[in-house]
Image: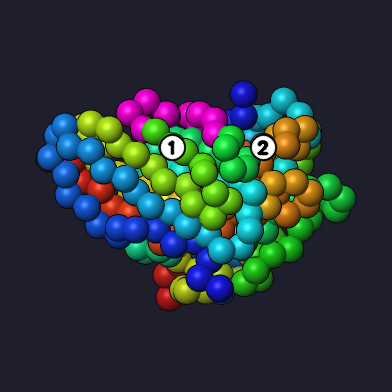
């Protein structure tokens, strides 16, 4: 099993450019989420999804869009990049319910720099 | 709203000594509590969780954590630290009455174990 796969691992953008961070999981997890990690801030939840066709906002959703057309994929879109979006982004997935819910499996991260 | 506080940015301990990394939480429903570890340039890895039952839970790599409902705390412990335990540790909470699986993380605590 590949687990959670994120691409790209590194990206440099100019202010105003758009891009999509890809996330795919092969564990048939219902729950998928995107976090950003900034020094001293820990991980902050951007958006999450509890199943195909269902998404919701987390703590810091502004400037980001998501969609969930399949169970496996959960892309994160930056429509107009800003320097404040320079960060390391993590995709994570888990089973939705029961005792296993919350045991997140993380991707290796995508480091984004916006100039 | 859920929240997690890790009051120490860094914990220093000598190899072979016991270690404690502190975590307090706030959640409206029953708390589901988690610890994750992050090694440099990697994604987070699940260590252990408390859902219900015994207040002392055991996890990977010899770590354990004690749930204290009255103090709303979930401190991570290990009887004898190893240099290889040096990493960034995150506490996280989920509202057990919610079925979204949404996890909120603390700011993280850097554990430094010196030989």
Task: Residue B78: give its label.
Answer: none
User: Is residue A56 shown left or right of residue B42?
Assistant: right
Residue A63 sits inside the magenta stretch: yes
Q: Name which residue lies at 41% across and 46% down.
A: A75
Residues under labels 2 and 1: Cα distance?
A: 16 Å
User: Is residue A41 shown left or right of residue B6?
Assistant: left
| Residue B12 at least partly seen | no
Q: Name which residue lies at 50% across and 70% down.
A: A2
Task: Residue A66: give its label.
Answer: 1
Give the number of marks. 2
Q: Which residues are magenta?
A: A55-64
Vertical order, B86 against A64 (above or below): below
Check the image and tell me how it is coloured: rainbow
Q: Which residue is mark 2?
A: B100
Residue B37 sits inside the magenta stretch: no
Helix, strand or loop at mark 2: loop
Q: Circle 2: is it few (<14), some (14-19), or many (20+) Cα within 10 Å?
A: many
Residue B11 is situated, as x and y percent measured from the top left of the image, at 47, 54
Disc 2 chain ID = B
Vertical order, B1 against B75 (above or below): above
Residue nearest the viewer, comparing A22 with B44:
A22
| Quarter occupied by residue A79 | top left
Residue nearest the viewer, comparing B104 with A101:
A101
Q: Main secondary structure of the magenta part?
A: loop
User: Is residue A10 shown left or right of residue B83?
Assistant: left
Q: Name which residue lies at 43% across and 75% down.
A: B115
Q: Circle 1: is it few (<14), some (14-19), or many (20+) Cα within 10 Å?
A: many
| Quarter occupied by residue A114 | top left
Q: Name which residue lies at 12% across and 40% down.
A: A14
| Residue A91 at least partly seen | yes
Residue B109 is situated, as x and y percent measured from the top left of the image, at 47, 50
Helix, strand or loop at mark 1: strand
């Amino acid at each position: 099993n590949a687990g959670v796969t994120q691409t790209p691992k590194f990206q440099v953008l100019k202010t105003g450019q758009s891009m999509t961070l890809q996330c795919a999981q092969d564990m048939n997890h219902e729950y998928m989420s995107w976090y950003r990690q900034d020094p001293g801030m820990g991980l902050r939840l951007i958006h999450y999804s509890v199943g195909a066709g269902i998404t919701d906002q987390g703590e810091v959703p502004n400037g980001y869009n998501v969609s969930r057309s399949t169970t496996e994929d959960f892309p994160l879109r930056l429509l107009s990049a800003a320097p404040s979006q320079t960060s390391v982004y993590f995709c994570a997935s888990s089973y939705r319910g029961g005792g296993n819910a919350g045991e997140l499996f993380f991707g290796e991260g995508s480091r984004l720099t916006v100039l | 709203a859920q929240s997690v506080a890790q009051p120490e940015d860094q914990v220093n301990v000598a190899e072979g000594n016991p270690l404690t990394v502190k975590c307090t939480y706030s959640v409206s429903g029953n708390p589901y509590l988690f610890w994750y570890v992050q090694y440099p340039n990697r994604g987070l890895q699940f260590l252990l969780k408390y859902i219900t039952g015994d207040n002392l839970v055991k996890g990977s790599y010899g770590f354990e954590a004690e749930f204290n409902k009255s103090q709303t705390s979930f401190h991570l412990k290990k009887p004898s630290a190893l240099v290889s335990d040096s990493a960034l540790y995150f506490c996280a909470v989920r509202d057990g009455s919610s079925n979204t699986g949404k996890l909120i993380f603390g700011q993280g605590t850097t554990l430094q174990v010196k030989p």
